Image: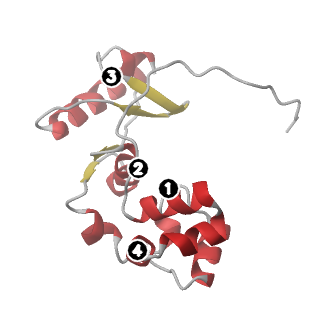
Amino acid sequence: MATLRGLGMPVEALGWDEAFLGTDAEEPEGVAHRIQQVVLGATRLHSSVGIGDNKIRAKIATGFGKPAGIYRLTADTWFEVMGPRPTIDLWGVGSKVSKRLAGLGIDTVEQLAAADTDALVAEFGPRMGTWYGDLGHGRGSAVVDDTPWVARGHSRETT
């Protein structure tokens, strides 16, 4: 993360090996190549970079860039790329949620985008139902928040 922060862009850490970086570059692929070079030089590890017009699309794009590649996913390409895919391919949709969506007749991202918001709210509640509807469109925050994360609690679990 220190290496990424040294690039002079906002960095929002997602974990020890994953982060969002904020840029409004005209050619984000050039920025992505620079990120890969800097990470490789500092860690001797290759990285995949997802480019998106928001964090949802960037996160999903990273999967298409693996291994060690770059992929761009935006509102313009969202339905072409994601529309026919199963809902479980969405970031934040696991097997339980995808099964509940299937129970509503929603199997693909395109069907989720077209789903009635009231039906989603009835199944998942007002917050998550609305969020899943937005997720079907690839909508999400584009703001990279570089505020340091502060632990709110500490587990006593031993693995």
Is residue 95 visible from the viewing direction of this image?
no
Q: Earlier in the sequence, mark 4 or mark 3?
A: 3
Disc number lying in front (2 or 3): 2
| Distance of label 2 from label 3 (alpha carbons) | 28 Å
Labels 1 & 2 near each other (Cβ < 8 A) = yes
Labels 1 & 4 near each other (Cβ < 8 A) = no
Residue type highlighted by circle 1:
Trp
- Image mark for residue 56: 2
- Residue 16: image x %, image y %? 55, 30
**For the residue labelled by badge 1, is the local secondary structure a helix, a strand or a loop?**
loop
Q: Earlier in the sequence, mark 4 or mark 2?
A: 2
- The residue sitting at 37% across, 54% down in the picture is 139
- The residue sitting at 44% across, 15% down in the picture is 2
- 43 shown above or below 88: above
User: Based on the displayed image, in which of its 4 quarters is residue 5 positioned?
Assistant: top left
Q: Earlier in the sequence, mark 3 or mark 1?
A: 3
Q: Earlier in the sequence, mark 2 or mark 3?
A: 3
Residue type highlighted by circle 4:
Arg
Disc number lying in front (4 or 2): 2
User: Based on the displayed image, in which of its 4 quarters is residue 101 positioned?
Assistant: bottom right
- The residue under label 4 is 85
- Image mark for residue 91: 1
Is 52 positioned to the left or the right of 148 in the image? left
**For the residue labelled by badge 3, is the local secondary structure a helix, a strand or a loop?**
helix
**For the residue labelled by badge 2, is the local secondary structure a helix, a strand or a loop?**
helix
Q: Earlier in the sequence, mark 1 or mark 4?
A: 4
Is residue 117 visible from the viewing direction of this image?
yes
**Quarter of the C terminus within the rendering:** top right
| Distance of label 4 from label 3 (alpha carbons) | 36 Å
Labels 4 & 2 near each other (Cβ < 8 A) = no
- Image mark for residue 41: 3
- Residue 103: image x %, image y %? 63, 83
